[in-house]
Every structure is written in C-alpha cells, then in structure tokens.
Image (tube, rainbow, N blue to C red):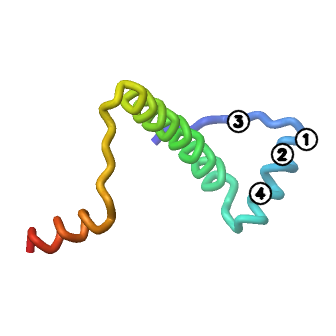
Amino acid sequence: MAVISLRLNRQEAEMVDFLSNYYEQDKSSLIKYSLKELYEDIVDKNVISDYEKRENEGSVSFVSASDVIKMLQTSE
C-alpha cells in the first residue's frame, strides 16, 4: 500500500474536516472515496461519449421493455 503525504492550506483542511464530520468518515476514507468518485466520473463521460458517437453513426438501437420481458420469459 502506498502512503501519500498531502499538504493542505487552512481552508482546504477545514473543508476536509467539515466533510469528514458530515459524512462520518475518517479523512483517509473520505479522500479515497472522493478519488474513486472523480475517476468514475471520467469513466462515465467516456461511456457517454462512446454512446453519442455510435448514436451519431446510426448504430444504436433500442429494445422496448415489453420485448425485454418477452426475451426473459423465453429464456427460462
């Protein structure tokens, strides 16, 4: 496991303290959670961008909910 030293100014330290208390998480867990959320945002943006590209190319199709239910029922 890596150990990272993080320097925060007074305002940043106050924000971490506030968020740590608000979410009832220790500071380390809070920072790890925040990093994970930021990373997931990037992954989500990439998925959306890929979808929009395929949509513009006309290679996207939709299946109705009733068709999905029929497919599930026939696969049993």
Q: From the image, tell me which residue sits under label 1.
A: 10
Q: From the image, tell me which residue sits under label 2.
A: 13
Q: Which residue: 78% across, 65% down? A: 21
Q: Which residue: 64% across, 48% down? A: 31
Q: Which residue: 77% across, 57% down? A: 19
In this view of the protein, which residue sits in the foreground, 30 or 62?
Answer: 62
Label 2: which secondary element: helix
Q: Amino acid at mark 2?
A: Ala
Q: Where residue 65 sits: x, y (%)?
A: 33, 65
The disc, 4 or 2, on the residue closer to the chain's N-terminal end is 2
The reply to whether the C-beta atoms of the residues labelled 2 and 3 are less than 8 Å apart is: no
Q: Where residue 68 sits: x, y (%)?
A: 25, 64
The disc, 3 or 4, on the residue closer to the chain's N-terminal end is 3
Query: Local crowd at mark 4 within 10 Å, few (<14), some, or many (≥20)?
Result: some
Q: Is residue 24 left or right of residue 69?
A: right
Q: Where residue 17 sits: x, y (%)?
A: 81, 55
Label 4: which secondary element: helix
In this view of the protein, which residue sits in the foreground, 8 or 50?
Answer: 50
Q: Is residue 41 above or below residue 22?
A: above
Spatial CA distance of label 2 from label 3 is 10 Å
Q: From the image, tell me which residue sits under label 4.
A: 19
Q: Amino acid at mark 3?
A: Leu
Q: Quadrant of the N terminus?
A: top left
Spatial CA distance of label 4 from label 1 is 14 Å
Q: Amino acid at mark 1?
A: Arg
Q: From the image, tell me which residue sits under label 3.
A: 6
